[in-house]
Amino acid sequence: MSSNTERSLVLLKPDAVRRGLLGEILSRFERKGLAIEALELRTMDAELADQHYSDHVEKAFYPPLKEFMTSGPLAALVLSGDEVIDVVRAMIGATDGRKAAAGTIRGDFSLSNRENLVHASDSPESAKRELDLWFPGRF
Ligand code: CMP
């Protein structure tokens, strides 16, 4: 049996904190068998938002996204496990909660393409960049 242990940077966004969904979402990751290697309640400032979303800063949806992401505390976590990057992306579902499949986190709990509860790294390269940004020197 082959295994490809990876790490992913996952953010439980301010809507997840405000709506009291941290336990529900963390529980899904734990029951899947993923390891939580770091977990911190943090508030994103404008500079971190621009760095984290550097691919999106020119897009029309970025100003309200930045406003939302800096609007209150979020939970920043590092998850690890076999193919965790793809596994977590499958568990959170499509970006737009209205279109995300039932059974996914966004499909079950979000009706928005902005307030979609969870961010997760989408490739090994973005995981490395995001882990360095959120947890410098730790992973
Ligand atoms: P995330 O996985 O954090 O990556 C980029 C974020 O931008 C995305 O989740 C959404 O929160 C937001 N986003 C992406 N597309 C749109 C859109 N069309 N309108 C509003 N927000 C969006």
Image (tube, grey):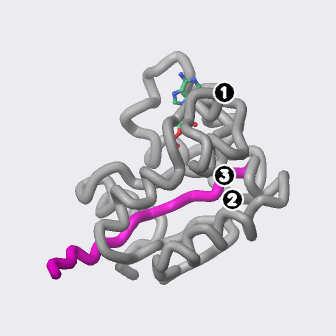
Disc 1: which residue: 64
Q: Would you place residue 9 above or below residue 105 in this image?
A: below
Q: Would you place residue 130 above or below residue 30 in this image?
A: above
Q: Tag 3, which secondary structure?
A: loop
Q: Is mark 3 within 8 Å of ligand 1?
A: yes
Which residue lies at the image location 69% right of the left edge and 59% below the top edge? 74
Q: Is mark 1 within 8 Å of ligand 1?
A: yes
Disc 3: which residue: 13
Q: Would you place residue 43 above or below residue 63 in this image?
A: below
**Which corner quadrant of the image does residue 5 belong to?**
bottom left
* Residue at the far right in the pictured view: 19
- From the top left corner, tell me how far across and down residue 123 is, in percent: 28, 52
Type of the residue with mark 1? Pro
Which residue lies at the image location 57% right of the left edge and 76% below the top edge? 31
Which residue lies at the image location 63% right of the left edge and 74% below the top edge? 40
Q: Is residue 122 magenta?
A: no
Which residue lies at the image location 74% right of the left edge and 58% below the top edge? 73
- From the top left corner, tell me how far across and down residue 14 is, in percent: 73, 51
Q: CA distance from mark 3 to mark 1?
A: 14 Å
Q: Earlier in the sequence, mark 2 or mark 1?
A: 1
Disc 2: which residue: 74
Type of the residue with mark 2? Leu
Quick check: marks 3 and 1 in contact, CB under 8 Å? no
Q: Which residues are magenta?
A: 1-14
